[in-house]
Image: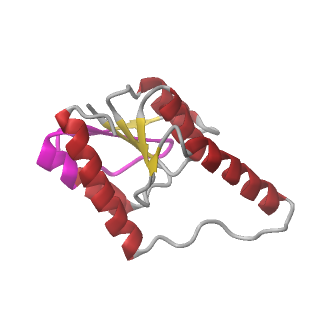
Amino acid sequence: MKIWIDADACPRVIKEIVFRASQRLKVPVCLVANTDLSRAHTPLVTSVRVAAGFDVADDYIAENAGPSDLVITADIPLAARVVEKGGVALDPRGELYTEENVSERLTMRNLMQDLRNDGMLLGGPPQFSLSDRQRFASGLDRLLTRMVRGDRP
């Protein structure tokens, strides 16, 4: 089991929560981004710098994450690819992507992107909050506990 983090846009506080869980459960973590990353000073945390380009980090994660791995990402297309391969994906706000919800989320994401492109909608998701952080920490803990035991979420 390994935790993959789509690190380009992942909030630092989420990475820190994952690093603490990694240490506690002895689960390796791999950060993937197209920029240099500072990382935790532990042998359990590694980082991969991919070439610059659209979806290069996502492609790397999708190709390398296995069905027993956990992917942390806010990127819904990446989450859809992970779930399609039988993997597990968690949003930095603590919501689990599933076969039941990922296609609906992808459709909504595409609609919102079209509305923004047409100038009918401004802005993106709400600012990351304390309750988002707490919801992520709780969701991650529950999920990792199940996965370490070998249970499928």
Name, please, the residue furthest toward the front.
100
Q: Quadrant of the N terminus?
A: top left
Is 109 on the left or on the right of 7, as rendered? right
The x and y percentages for residue 22 are 20, 46
- Residue 145, image x and y in percent? 20, 45
**In this picture, which residue range is highlighted in magenta?**
20-46
Magenta span includes 12: no
Q: Is residue 102 left or right of residue 68?
A: right
- In this view of the protein, can residue 51 be seen by the observer? no
- Residue 27 painted magenta: yes
Please tell me which residue is depicted at 56% across the width and 37% down the height of the picture: 80
Is 149 placed left or right of 90 in the picture? Answer: left
Q: Residue furthest right?
A: 118
Evaluate whether residue 22 shows in this view.
yes
Q: How is the image coloured?
A: secondary structure
Vertical comparison of 68 with 138: above or below: above
> Which corner quadrant of the image does residue 49 belong to?
top left
Position of residue 85 measured from the top left corner of the image (x, y, whole percent)? 48, 25
Compared to residue 101, the image places residue 94 above or below, namely: below
Q: In front: 109, or 146?
A: 146
Of residues 121 and 12, which is closer to you in this image? 121
Question: Where is residue 5 drawn, in percent x and y?
Answer: 39, 44
- Say which residue appears at 52% left-offset and 73% top-offset: 127
Identify which residue is drawn at 49% across, 30% down: 62
Residue 77 sits in quarter: top right
**Number of marks in the image?**
0
| Location of residue 95 with respect to 78 vertically, above or below | below
- In which quadrant will I find the C terminus? top left
- The residue positioned 56% from the left and 71% from the top of the image is 126
Q: Nearer the viewer, residue 66 or 61?
A: 66
